[in-house]
């Protein structure tokens, strides 16, 4: 490997051993960094695929493993960062030790917003194993939250033979997808026997969820999927938070020698400062941030059309571009999903600012082709249909 060490950066610490942390390690090595690299993760297991937890792992015990890393970082697992001294350039760990660094990558992700009182959540491998085990007894299940995660859990529970009720404060996945796709997915959920109850959960006691309108939903198992909270508490005394948020620039930089990536970070995307808590976004952000740590302004800016996928109720969706989308799509492939909900179909929308969105439903298409379809609004080359 070529020695390409940025002057003054000999030791890099990555805090957070998820996909953003692992990608940052890989990207630092690819960019030529051959100094001391340490990754700290509070989970005691090696990094794994988090999206698999609500899909393959929950439904059929499919794999959640990631390829073994080749970056050769020292991995401190089962250890949490509890503080950061920016001036002294040290990360404080919960085992009482300090880690000195010249460069730091903050990649501590997010955790579920809790509902409390016995509701399960799904973020970690342990959460998924517990939920899977509970589903084997086929309890009645109430899922609070009707975003993609809540609906994937509902799908897995229905597949396990449970009676499932989803508590939805908007139509399922309407804020994430827009009306056309939300209706398609809600139709598939109700066809699978899932009951949707409208309302906002305001309390949970002994398996009874109370909604704002006074309605009650009772189930043997309650799962909450009501959003996530970035893991920034360890940075509270660092001076890096603005109104409790870790805000990076378009290259992931938060301070000299300190970058952030993934679910933990807010960053400006086409003028709007926000988080994009998606798997591929965490990967793209980590690539940019790693290069920015070494090369500053010579790094590319983060500016990608997000890639997103979900699998539920027999529908496999892959999307490139800004969701939600308004109105009806143009069909690049397949028939109106109202007639044939399970596709295969390739749909296209164009936002008023000209940005394209392409969505494949039960249609196998490589991401670069999907990206081309989003940009051009044309069916890209020859594609192979699959269920
Ligand atoms: C069940 C589930 C399904 C999902 N499905 C999809 C999907 O289909 N498509 C999609 O695009 N996205 C999906 N996502 C979102 C995607 O998984 C996340 O966007 C992605 O994992 C973010 O990666 P990250 O590395 O930023 O954070 P994380 O994966 O959360 O990793 C951060 C790591 O840092 C650790 N950590 C936190 N605090 C500390 C600390 N103080 N010290 C040390 N370590 C710490 C955490 O425990 C964690 O291991 C899903 C998420 C979940 C939970």
Image (tube, rainbow, N blue to C red):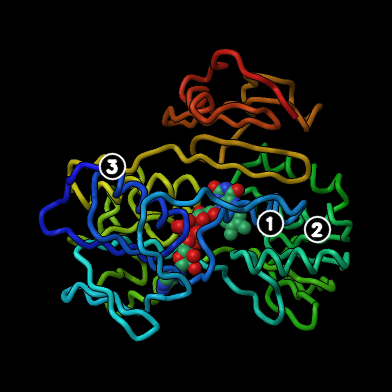
Please identify, in this view, whether the residue under mark 1 or under mark 3 is nearer the observer: 3
- The disc, 2 or 3, on the residue closer to the chain's N-terminal end is 2
Quarter of the image for residue 303 reads top left
Which part of the image, by quadrant, shows the C terminus? Answer: top right
Q: Separation of disc 2 and disc 1 at Cα?
A: 14 Å
Q: Secondary structure at mark 1?
A: loop
- The disc, 2 or 1, on the residue closer to the chain's N-terminal end is 1
Residue at mark 1: C-beta within 8 A of ligand 1: no
Residue furthest out toward the top: 381
Q: Secondary structure at mark 3?
A: loop
For the point 64% across and 25% down, the residue is: 346
Looking at the picture, tell me which residue is in the foreground, 227 or 79: 79
**Left or right of 236 in this view: 154:** right
Residue 97 visible at all? yes
Residue 280 circle label: none
Residue 373 in picture, x, y percent from top left: 52, 22
Q: Secondary structure at mark 2?
A: helix
Residue 98 in picture, x, y percent from top left: 28, 79
Q: Separation of disc 1 and disc 3 at Cα?
A: 33 Å
Q: Which residue is mark 1?
A: 146
Residue furthest out toward the bottom: 96
Q: Which residue is mark 3?
A: 301
**Left or right of 230 in this view: 48:** right
Q: Which residue is mark 2?
A: 157
Residue at mark 2: C-beta within 8 A of ligand 1: no
State if disc 3 and disc 2 touch (CB < 8 Å): no
* Few, some or many residues within 10 Å of mark 2 (<14, 14–19, 20+): many
Which part of the image, by quadrant, shows the N terminus? Answer: top left
């Amino acid at each position: 490997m070529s020695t390409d060490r940025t002057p003054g950066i000999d030791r890099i610490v990555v805090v957070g051993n998820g996909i953003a942390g692992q990608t940052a390690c890989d990207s630092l090595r690819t960019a030529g960094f051959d100094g001391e690299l340490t990754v700290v993760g509070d989970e005691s297991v090696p990094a794994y695929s988090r999206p698999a937890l609500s899909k393959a792992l929950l439904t059929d015990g499919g794999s959640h493993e990631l390829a073994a890393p080749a970056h050769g970082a020292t991995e401190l697992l089962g250890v949490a960062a509890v503080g950061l001294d920016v001036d002294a350039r040290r990360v404080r760990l919960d085992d009482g030790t300090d880690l000195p660094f010249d460069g730091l990558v903050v990649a501590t992700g997010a955790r579920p917003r809790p509902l409390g009182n016995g509701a399960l959540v799904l973020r970690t491998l342990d959460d998924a194993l517990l939920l899977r085990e509970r589903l084997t007894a086929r309890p009645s299940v109430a899922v609070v939250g009707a975003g993609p995660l809540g609906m994937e859990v509902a799908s897995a529970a229905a597949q396990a033979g449970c009676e499932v009720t989803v508590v939805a404060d908007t139509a399922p996945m309407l804020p994430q997808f827009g009306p056309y796709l939300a209706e398609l997915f809600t139709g598939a959920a109700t066809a699978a026997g899932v009951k949707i109850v409208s309302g906002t959960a305001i309390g949970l006691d002994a398996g009874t969820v109370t909604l704002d309108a006074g309605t009650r939903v009772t189930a043997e198992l309650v799962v909450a999927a009501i959003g996530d909270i970035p893991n920034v508490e360890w940075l509270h005394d660092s001076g890096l938070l603005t109104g409790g948020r870790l805000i990076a620039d378009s290259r992931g930089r938060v301070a000299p020698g300190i970058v952030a990536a993934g679910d933990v970070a807010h960053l400006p995307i086409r003028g709007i400062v926000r988080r994009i808590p998606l798997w591929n976004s965490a990967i793209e952000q980590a690539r940019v941030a790693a290069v920015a740590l070494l090369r500053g302004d010579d790094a590319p800016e983060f500016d990608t059309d997000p890639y997103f996928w979900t699998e539920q109720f027999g529908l496999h969706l892959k999307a490139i571009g800004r969701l939600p989308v308004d109105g009806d799509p143009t069909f690049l492939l397949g028939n109106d999903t109202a007639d044939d909900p399970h596709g295969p179909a390739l749909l296209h929308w164009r936002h008023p600012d000209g940005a394209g969105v392409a969505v494949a439903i039960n249609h196998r298409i490589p991401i670069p082709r999907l990206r081309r379809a989003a940009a051009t609004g044309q069916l890209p080359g020859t594609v192979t249909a699959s269920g």
